[in-house]
């Protein structure tokens, strides 16, 4: 990856890249509870379904290689939770760290959620994933829950932490329903150019 890249909305053709990036962490005890990586077809369905309501962005270098992505999903299934989004972010193992790529993806993701009218972003993180915990705290997330022994992977109990960030404009319950991402897309450009990760328009 060179320092020029773009963040754009994920398309059907990105399913394999997302599958491969996430797949490189499924044997990892720190990054994810996932044990079997879903198929490319399942990633394709995930991209399509996610974009109906939530953003799904990829980071792409000037040669067209995808080296990271982020996406949203419901925090809980019940309707009353609809102003909350759980997000996932993953960079390829060989994507340079601490260069601002994760932050650039987050900034675009957060900007979009605010435009849609969501109120909170949540991250669910394995409690030993120190880089991710530090990353989220640097973005303004706070720890709101620690679930000890939340699951077993490779014969080990693992805990998770929930972090959240308030992105709403009001504490009032008089808010409109979040605008579906696909509706927002009809009116806006879907690509953001980045020059050195911190300068994105
Ligand atoms: C977590 C992740 C997305 C961070 O991406 P990144 O591009 O390296 O993060 P950034 O460069 O934007 O970091 C922003 C800030 O977060 C903090 N941070 C990020 N990584 C850190 C680390 N390893 N240790 C301490 N602080 C860290 C720092 O404050 C950093 O700012 P600084 O470098 O100026 O001090 C990336 O490491 C990753 O994809 N890891 C593997 C998958 C994963 O764990 N995903 C999260 C699952 S919950």
Image (cartoon, rainbow, N blue to C red):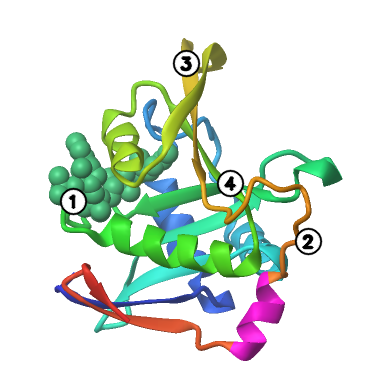
Q: Position of residue 101 (x, y in %)?
A: 26, 61
Who comes first in sequence, dot 2 or dot 4? 4
Who comes first in sequence, dot 3 or dot 1? 1
Where disc 1 sits, the SS reads loop
- The answer to which image quadrant residue 80 occupies is top right
Are the two marked residues, 2 and 4, in contact with CB atoms closer than 8 angstroms?
no
Q: Which residues are magenta?
A: 181-187
Q: Look at mark 2 in the image and give the residue it sits on.
A: 177
Question: How many angstroms separate mark 4 from mark 1 (CA)?
Answer: 26 Å
Question: How many angstroms separate mark 3 from mark 1 (CA)?
Answer: 25 Å
Residue 45 appears left or right of 2 = right
Who comes first in sequence, dot 1 or dot 2? 1
Residue 138 appears left or right of 28 = left
Q: Position of residue 175 (x, y in %)?
A: 75, 57
Disc 4 crowd, CA 10 A, few/some/many (<14, 14-19, 20+): many
Question: How many angstroms separate mark 2 from mark 4 (CA)?
Answer: 13 Å
Where disc 4 sits, the SS reads strand
Residue 184 is a magenta residue: yes
Q: Look at mark 4 in the image and give the residue it sits on.
A: 120
Question: How many angstroms separate mark 4 from mark 3 (CA)?
Answer: 25 Å
Quarter holding ligand 1: top left
Q: Does ligand 1 reach within 8 Å of label 2's beta carbon? A: no
Q: Look at mark 1 in the image and give the residue it sits on.
A: 97
Q: Position of residue 122 (x, y in %)?
A: 54, 41
Q: Look at mark 3 in the image and give the residue it sits on.
A: 158
- The answer to which image quadrant residue 192 occupies is bottom left
The mark found on residue 133 in the picture is none
Residue 157 visible (yes or no):
yes
Are the two marked residues, 4 and 3, in contact with CB atoms closer than 8 angstroms?
no
Are the two marked residues, 4 and 1, in contact with CB atoms closer than 8 angstroms?
no
């Amino acid at each position: 990856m060179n320092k020029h890249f773009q963040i754009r909305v994920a398309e059907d053709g990105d399913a394999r890249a997302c599958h491969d990036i996430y797949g490189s962490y499924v044997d990892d005890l720190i990054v994810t509870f996932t044990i079997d990586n879903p198929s490319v077809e399942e990633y394709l369905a995930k991209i399509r379904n996610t974009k109906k309501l939530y953003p799904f962005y990829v980071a792409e270098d000037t040669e067209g290689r995808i080296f990271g992505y982020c996406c949203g999903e419901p925090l809980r299934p019940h309707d009353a939770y609809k102003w909350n989004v759980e997000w996932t972010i993953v960079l390829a193992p060989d994507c340079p760290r601490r260069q601002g790529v994760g932050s650039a993806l987050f900034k675009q993701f957060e900007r979009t959620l605010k435009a849609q009218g969501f109120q909170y972003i949540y991250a669910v993180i394995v409690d030993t994933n120190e880089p991710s915990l530090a990353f989220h705290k640097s973005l303004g997330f706070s720890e709101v829950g620690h679930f000890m022994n939340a699951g077993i992977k490779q014969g080990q109990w693992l805990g998770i932490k929930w972090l959240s960030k308030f992105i709403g404009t009001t504490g009032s319950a008089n808010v409109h329903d979040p605008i579906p991402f696909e509706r927002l897309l009809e009116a806006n450009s879907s690509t953001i150019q980045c020059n050195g990760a911190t300068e994105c328009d």
